[in-house]
Protein backbone atom coordinates (compact mmCIF):
# COMPACT_ATOMS: atom_id res chain seq x y z
CA UNK A 1 0.00 0.00 0.00
CA UNK A 2 2.84 2.36 0.89
CA UNK A 3 4.51 1.65 -2.46
CA UNK A 4 1.36 2.75 -4.30
CA UNK A 5 1.25 5.96 -2.24
CA UNK A 6 4.86 6.70 -3.27
CA UNK A 7 3.95 6.14 -6.93
CA UNK A 8 1.05 8.61 -6.58
CA UNK A 9 3.38 11.12 -4.85
CA UNK A 10 5.82 10.77 -7.75
CA UNK A 11 2.99 11.27 -10.25
CA UNK A 12 1.78 14.41 -8.44
CA UNK A 13 5.26 15.97 -8.35
CA UNK A 14 5.88 15.00 -11.98
CA UNK A 15 2.55 16.57 -12.96
CA UNK A 16 3.41 19.88 -11.24
CA UNK A 17 6.92 19.88 -12.75
CA UNK A 18 5.42 19.27 -16.20
CA UNK A 19 2.83 22.03 -15.72
CA UNK A 20 5.07 24.73 -14.23
CA UNK A 21 8.71 23.74 -14.60
CA UNK A 22 9.21 24.23 -10.84
CA UNK A 23 11.96 21.97 -9.52
CA UNK A 24 10.72 18.66 -8.10
CA UNK A 25 13.04 18.87 -5.07
CA UNK A 26 11.09 21.78 -3.57
CA UNK A 27 7.99 19.55 -3.57
CA UNK A 28 9.22 15.99 -3.13
CA UNK A 29 11.45 16.46 -0.07
CA UNK A 30 8.78 18.13 2.14
CA UNK A 31 6.17 15.58 0.95
CA UNK A 32 8.46 12.71 2.01
CA UNK A 33 9.16 14.34 5.39
CA UNK A 34 5.62 15.48 6.28
CA UNK A 35 3.37 12.84 4.69
CA UNK A 36 5.55 9.73 4.86
CA UNK A 37 7.64 10.54 7.95
CA UNK A 38 10.90 9.84 6.07
CA UNK A 39 14.03 11.02 7.91
CA UNK A 40 15.37 14.29 6.40
CA UNK A 41 18.74 12.81 5.36
CA UNK A 42 17.00 9.91 3.53
CA UNK A 43 14.45 12.26 1.92
CA UNK A 44 17.21 14.58 0.66
CA UNK A 45 19.50 11.78 -0.61
CA UNK A 46 16.67 9.93 -2.40
CA UNK A 47 15.24 13.13 -3.86
CA UNK A 48 18.61 14.18 -5.31
CA UNK A 49 18.76 11.08 -7.52
CA UNK A 50 15.03 11.47 -8.26
CA UNK A 51 15.79 15.00 -9.54
CA UNK A 52 18.81 13.84 -11.56
CA UNK A 53 16.83 11.17 -13.42
CA UNK A 54 13.74 13.35 -14.01
CA UNK A 55 15.77 16.30 -15.33
CA UNK A 56 17.97 14.11 -17.53
CA UNK A 57 15.17 13.56 -20.05
CA UNK A 58 14.40 17.28 -20.16
CA UNK A 59 18.06 18.12 -20.76
CA UNK A 60 18.32 15.71 -23.70
CA UNK A 61 15.19 17.26 -25.23
CA UNK A 62 16.52 20.82 -24.74
CA UNK A 63 19.95 19.88 -26.11
CA UNK A 64 18.34 18.49 -29.27
CA UNK A 65 16.40 21.74 -29.64
CA UNK A 66 19.74 23.62 -29.31
CA UNK A 67 18.46 26.01 -26.62
CA UNK A 68 21.10 25.26 -23.97
CA UNK A 69 23.93 27.77 -23.63
CA UNK A 70 26.72 25.38 -22.61
CA UNK A 71 29.24 28.10 -21.54
CA UNK A 72 26.68 29.22 -18.92
CA UNK A 73 26.25 25.61 -17.74
CA UNK A 74 30.03 25.05 -17.49
CA UNK A 75 30.55 28.23 -15.45
CA UNK A 76 27.85 27.20 -12.99
CA UNK A 77 29.20 23.64 -12.71
CA UNK A 78 32.72 24.93 -12.02
CA UNK A 79 31.38 26.34 -8.74
CA UNK A 80 28.58 23.90 -7.84
CA UNK A 81 30.34 20.52 -8.30
CA UNK A 82 33.36 21.32 -6.03
CA UNK A 83 30.99 22.83 -3.43
CA UNK A 84 28.84 19.69 -3.52
CA UNK A 85 31.91 17.47 -3.01
CA UNK A 86 33.13 19.59 -0.06
CA UNK A 87 29.63 19.48 1.52
CA UNK A 88 29.51 15.69 1.06
CA UNK A 89 32.91 15.37 2.75
CA UNK A 90 31.66 17.39 5.75
CA UNK A 91 28.49 15.24 5.92
CA UNK A 92 30.66 12.13 5.81
CA UNK A 93 32.81 13.41 8.70
CA UNK A 94 29.82 14.44 10.85
CA UNK A 95 27.45 11.58 9.90
CA UNK A 96 24.29 12.44 7.93
CA UNK A 97 22.01 10.73 10.47
CA UNK A 98 23.38 12.66 13.48
CA UNK A 99 20.88 14.87 15.31
CA UNK A 100 23.00 18.01 14.67
CA UNK A 101 23.11 17.42 10.90
CA UNK A 102 19.39 16.48 10.82
CA UNK A 103 18.46 19.71 12.61
CA UNK A 104 20.67 21.81 10.34
CA UNK A 105 19.27 20.08 7.22
CA UNK A 106 15.68 20.71 8.33
CA UNK A 107 16.26 24.42 9.08
CA UNK A 108 18.22 24.97 5.85
CA UNK A 109 15.49 23.18 3.90
CA UNK A 110 12.90 25.49 5.46
CA UNK A 111 14.80 28.62 4.39
CA UNK A 112 15.41 27.15 0.91
CA UNK A 113 11.65 26.54 0.51
CA UNK A 114 10.88 30.13 1.56
CA UNK A 115 13.34 31.41 -1.07
CA UNK A 116 11.81 29.08 -3.67
CA UNK A 117 8.31 30.29 -2.74
CA UNK A 118 9.38 33.93 -3.23
CA UNK A 119 11.09 33.13 -6.55
CA UNK A 120 8.05 31.13 -7.77
CA UNK A 121 5.67 33.97 -6.87
CA UNK A 122 7.94 36.50 -8.62
CA UNK A 123 7.93 34.41 -11.80
CA UNK A 124 4.13 33.97 -11.57
CA UNK A 125 3.57 37.73 -11.26
CA UNK A 126 6.05 38.53 -13.99
CA UNK A 127 4.20 36.19 -16.34
CA UNK A 128 5.38 34.41 -19.47
CA UNK A 129 8.43 35.74 -21.23
CA UNK A 130 9.86 36.35 -24.35
CA UNK A 131 11.32 34.83 -27.38
CA UNK A 132 13.57 31.81 -27.15
CA UNK A 133 16.17 33.20 -29.56
CA UNK A 134 18.89 35.75 -28.87
CA UNK A 135 19.12 38.87 -31.05
CA UNK A 136 21.36 38.04 -34.01
CA UNK A 137 24.97 39.08 -33.46
CA UNK A 138 24.52 39.24 -29.67
CA UNK A 139 24.88 35.50 -28.91
CA UNK A 140 28.26 35.82 -27.15
CA UNK A 141 27.20 39.00 -25.35
CA UNK A 142 23.96 37.38 -24.08
CA UNK A 143 25.89 34.40 -22.65
CA UNK A 144 28.31 36.74 -20.84
CA UNK A 145 27.57 37.32 -17.12
CA UNK A 146 27.76 40.69 -15.34
CA UNK A 147 31.13 39.51 -13.95
CA UNK A 148 33.05 36.30 -14.77
CA UNK A 149 33.26 35.23 -11.11
CA UNK A 150 29.56 35.57 -10.25
CA UNK A 151 28.28 32.33 -11.89
CA UNK A 152 31.05 30.37 -10.13
CA UNK A 153 30.21 31.93 -6.73
CA UNK A 154 26.49 31.47 -7.27
CA UNK A 155 27.12 27.87 -8.39
CA UNK A 156 29.05 27.21 -5.16
CA UNK A 157 26.16 28.52 -3.02
CA UNK A 158 23.59 26.47 -4.96
CA UNK A 159 25.84 23.39 -4.90
CA UNK A 160 26.02 23.55 -1.11
CA UNK A 161 22.28 24.24 -0.75
CA UNK A 162 21.26 21.43 -3.12
CA UNK A 163 23.56 18.87 -1.43
CA UNK A 164 22.14 19.75 1.99
CA UNK A 165 18.45 20.09 1.05
CA UNK A 166 17.93 18.90 -2.59
CA UNK A 167 16.30 22.33 -3.15
CA UNK A 168 17.75 25.37 -4.91
CA UNK A 169 18.51 24.51 -8.53
CA UNK A 170 14.96 25.32 -9.69
CA UNK A 171 13.11 28.59 -9.10
CA UNK A 172 15.96 30.13 -7.02
CA UNK A 173 18.47 29.30 -9.76
CA UNK A 174 16.30 30.78 -12.51
CA UNK A 175 15.72 34.02 -10.56
CA UNK A 176 19.44 34.57 -9.88
CA UNK A 177 20.40 33.69 -13.47
CA UNK A 178 17.98 36.37 -14.69
CA UNK A 179 20.07 38.89 -12.73
CA UNK A 180 23.45 37.43 -13.83
CA UNK A 181 22.48 37.16 -17.52
CA UNK A 182 20.09 40.07 -18.23
CA UNK A 183 20.33 39.69 -22.04
CA UNK A 184 19.55 35.96 -22.09
CA UNK A 185 15.86 35.15 -22.83
CA UNK A 186 14.02 33.40 -19.98
CA UNK A 187 13.46 30.10 -21.88
CA UNK A 188 17.24 29.81 -22.41
CA UNK A 189 17.88 30.63 -18.73
CA UNK A 190 15.46 27.85 -17.71
CA UNK A 191 17.20 25.46 -20.15
CA UNK A 192 20.64 26.27 -18.67
CA UNK A 193 19.26 25.85 -15.13
CA UNK A 194 17.84 22.39 -15.93
CA UNK A 195 21.05 21.29 -17.71
CA UNK A 196 23.46 22.22 -14.92
CA UNK A 197 21.16 20.67 -12.28
CA UNK A 198 21.69 17.20 -13.81
CA UNK A 199 25.43 16.76 -13.05
CA UNK A 200 25.00 18.59 -9.72
CA UNK A 201 22.14 16.39 -8.44
CA UNK A 202 23.81 13.26 -9.84
CA UNK A 203 27.11 13.97 -8.02
CA UNK A 204 25.32 14.99 -4.81
CA UNK A 205 22.89 12.03 -5.04
CA UNK A 206 25.64 9.45 -5.63
CA UNK A 207 27.59 11.01 -2.77
CA UNK A 208 24.56 10.59 -0.49
CA UNK A 209 24.21 6.99 -1.77
CA UNK A 210 27.79 6.30 -0.66
CA UNK A 211 26.78 7.56 2.82
CA UNK A 212 23.75 5.24 2.89
CA UNK A 213 21.34 8.18 2.52
CA UNK A 214 19.34 6.81 -0.44
CA UNK A 215 16.30 4.54 -0.21
CA UNK A 216 16.49 2.66 -3.54
CA UNK A 217 13.02 0.96 -3.48
CA UNK A 218 11.49 4.36 -2.61
CA UNK A 219 13.37 5.99 -5.51
CA UNK A 220 12.05 3.35 -7.94
CA UNK A 221 8.45 3.94 -6.79
CA UNK A 222 8.76 7.73 -7.11
CA UNK A 223 10.23 7.47 -10.63
CA UNK A 224 7.48 5.03 -11.67
CA UNK A 225 4.96 7.78 -10.90
CA UNK A 226 6.88 10.88 -11.97
CA UNK A 227 7.72 9.85 -15.55
CA UNK A 228 4.04 9.58 -16.65
CA UNK A 229 3.24 12.60 -14.43
CA UNK A 230 5.70 14.85 -16.28
CA UNK A 231 4.36 13.61 -19.63
CA UNK A 232 0.75 14.43 -18.65
CA UNK A 233 1.74 17.79 -17.13
CA UNK A 234 3.73 18.94 -20.17
CA UNK A 235 0.76 18.12 -22.43
CA UNK A 236 -1.68 20.02 -20.18
CA UNK A 237 0.62 23.05 -19.84
CA UNK A 238 -1.13 25.15 -22.52
CA UNK A 239 -4.60 24.35 -21.13
CA UNK A 240 -4.07 25.39 -17.50
CA UNK A 241 -3.75 28.84 -15.81
CA UNK A 242 -0.01 28.65 -15.10
CA UNK A 243 0.03 31.93 -13.13
CA UNK A 244 -2.68 30.68 -10.72
CA UNK A 245 -0.92 27.31 -10.22
CA UNK A 246 2.43 29.02 -9.54
CA UNK A 247 0.84 31.42 -7.04
CA UNK A 248 -0.86 28.57 -5.14
CA UNK A 249 2.39 26.59 -5.24
CA UNK A 250 4.34 29.50 -3.74
CA UNK A 251 1.86 29.62 -0.80
CA UNK A 252 2.23 25.85 -0.21
CA UNK A 253 6.05 26.08 -0.34
CA UNK A 254 6.06 29.03 2.08
CA UNK A 255 3.82 27.08 4.50
CA UNK A 256 6.12 24.03 4.31
CA UNK A 257 9.17 26.27 4.79
CA UNK A 258 7.79 27.91 7.96
CA UNK A 259 6.71 24.52 9.31
CA UNK A 260 10.20 23.05 8.81
CA UNK A 261 11.91 26.03 10.49
CA UNK A 262 9.52 25.66 13.45
CA UNK A 263 10.35 21.94 13.90
Image (cartoon, rainbow, N blue to C red):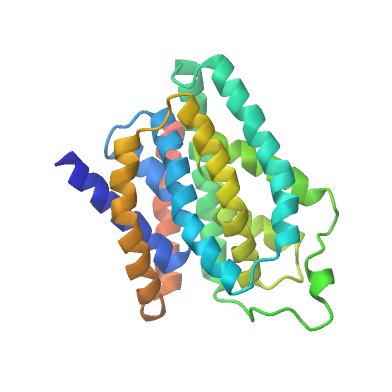
Residue 90 shows in the view: yes
Q: Which residue corresponds to the image point at 45% horizontal and 17% vertical from the top-left?
A: 99
Q: Residue at x 32, y 47 (%)?
A: 222
- The location of residue 79, given as percent across then percent down, is 73, 42
What residue lies at 26% left-to-right and 45% top-to-bottom? 6
Q: Considering depth in this image, is 43 or 209 the residue closer to the camera?
A: 209
Pinpoint residue 154: horizontal percent, then vertical percent. 72, 46
Please state if 11 lies on the left or on the right of 259 as rendered.
Answer: left
Q: Is residue 96 left or right of residue 225?
A: right
Q: Residue furthest left?
A: 1
Q: Residue furthest bottom?
A: 136
Q: Nearer the viewer, residue 70 or 237?
A: 70
Q: Is residue 254 visible?
A: no
Q: Is residue 201 above or below residue 232?
A: above
Residue 170 location, quadrant: bottom right
Towards the viewer: 226 or 238: 226
Amino acid sequence: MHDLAFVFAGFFVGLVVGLTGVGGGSLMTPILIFFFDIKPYLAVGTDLLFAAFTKMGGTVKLARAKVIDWPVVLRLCSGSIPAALITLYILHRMGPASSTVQGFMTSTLGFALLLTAAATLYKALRGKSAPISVVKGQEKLAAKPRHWSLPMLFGAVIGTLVTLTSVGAGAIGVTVLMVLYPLLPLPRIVAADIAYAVPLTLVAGLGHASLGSVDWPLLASLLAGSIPGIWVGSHLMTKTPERVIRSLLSVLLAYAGFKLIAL
